Image: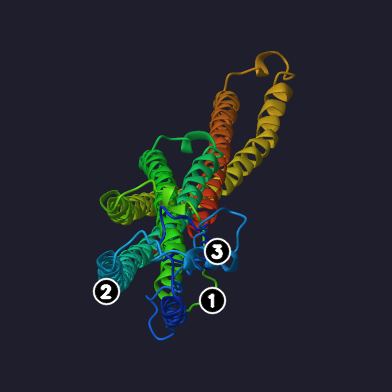
Amino acid sequence: MDWLGCPLTAFSTHHKSSPDHFLPAIDPMASSHRNHAAHCSVPQSNGLPWMPRAYYKAATTHPTLAPLSGPDLSPIEMLPSMCNRRAIFTRYSPNDWSCSNQSNYREAQMCRRKAELLTADSSRLVRDKHQQTCQTQADNSKKLGQRLRDIQFWRVQLCRELEEMMKESDALAETKARLERALAEAEVSLQVAQECLLHREKRMGIDLVHDEVEKQLVTEVDVIRACLERMQLSLKKAKAQLLNNRAAQQELEKDLSNKQVAQRIDGKCHQLMNHSDGIGSYHGVQRVDATISVPQSWAKFSDDNILLSQRERAASAQLRGSIENLMEVTANEIWSQFNRVNVAFTKRIAQTDDAKNKIQAHLAKTLKEIFRMEMTIEGLRKAIKDKEAPLKVAQSRLDERTRRPQMELCRDPAQLRLVREVYEIDDTVQSLRRQLRKAEDSLQRLVHTKTALEHDLAIKVNSLFLEQEKCLGLRKTFPSTTRLLGYV
């Protein structure tokens, strides 16, 4: 018999009659062979998927009588010769014929038994392999499901860490913006202090003194510059930390994006079934190994990204705290020095204003004294002028008495009194002139004093204008503590 797995046709084997090999067949045997061949075809089973689609047929033979006289004699021609003999010549005995039949029966039975065993083994093998395939597919589906749960777990972790990192980055960016605003306000305060120093350089004369205000202003400039240096250093650190945060965030986003793609692909694979659309044969794909990681390294990669993000987030939070503390400290330092400078300005303005008031009082008294001195000088000049007539009278009398004749030129009491009168008037005029010179000198001194007082008053007024109007007016624009903390 032949197995026909592919479309095969049963073929008949035709043997030539040979007296040495075949026993002549009789019609009942041939009929039985034909009937056996007709009943040996196995119908295809459509109910059992493991049954083969092959069937088998018994080979049929058509034996003929062996020739007795030669290959060219027909059986009809041989009958007269055989009839002349006592018996028909045969090669086999009935025993041989029975043994041959028994042998064929046993062989047929053995073949059927083997075929039955093979059929049972094939059915069992098909069932076992089908169960094994189903179990393997179920295991793979289970592993894909577990893989999806692992991916979902790491996605949740990555999403949570990414959200925390984004919040921390936003907070650090806000703190950085506040620091930049505080830095700008501190620069404004530095400019105010420097302009105050420049305005005070416009003081005149004796008011160009290195007083407490100037010392406090110089200290304020130094304090603000030191605060600016620390704030600029913290600003550089904040910018660098923001870059690190963005790098860690980018790694998280990249890993999360890869996880999403992998989850979509594995989810599609997990949903594929034997009856799904889109399945196909990809020969040799099992020999392609494009993997670059193992579950341990795969999980470690995401864990390392999360740990890196957590480290950067912790560093960012610490830097944010230090920046907050720095802004508070610098704001307090700048504002405290600002108050000290204002106190010094207030004291200095009070001193300058008191000096100005005293100068004004002295100037008023000096002007009054100058007026009195001018009146005195006018009186002295009038007194001197008033002495000219009596002096002329006395001198005229003496000159006229010199014309008395001879013995009349007597040094009488009148003559002596006239001479004494002339000397007295002359002494009076000289003393008045000396007093006049003294009064004029005093007037000059008073005028010089008035000029000095007026100049000093102008200096004090200029100083008060610079300190009250310019410096204190400018310092009214000094940033408040809230603005120095970076709040709008």
- Return the disc, 1 or 3, that comes first in the chain's sequence: 3
Q: In this picture, is 255 found above or below 199?
A: below
Q: Are marks 2 and 3 in contact (CB under 8 Å)?
A: no
Give the image quarter of residue 385.
top right
Question: Residue 473: horizontal and vertical position, in percent?
Answer: 52, 58
Q: Position of residue 485 (x, y in %)?
A: 39, 59
**Residue neighbourhood size for the residue with mark 1, other residues' Cα within 10 Å, grouped as few (<14), some (14–19), many (≥20):** few
User: Is residue 427 at least partly visible in the picture?
Assistant: yes
* In front of the other: 286 or 463: 286
In the image, taking residue 195 as reference, residue 296 lies left or right, namely left
Pick the quarter of the image with the N terminus.
bottom left
Q: In which quadrant of the rendered view does residue 173 lie?
A: bottom left
Which residue is the extreme one toward the bottom? 47
Q: Residue 486: in sight, yes or no?
A: no
- Residue linked to disc 2: 120
Could you tell whether 458 is left or right of 54 in the image?
right
The kind of secondary structure element at disc 1 is loop
Identity of the amino acid at label 1?
Asp
- Residue under numbered circle 1: 277
Decide if residue 406 is on the left or right side of residue 46: right
State the residue at coordinates (58%, 69%).
76
- Amino acid tagged 2: Ala
Mark 3 residue element: helix
* Camera-side residue of 244 and 374: 244
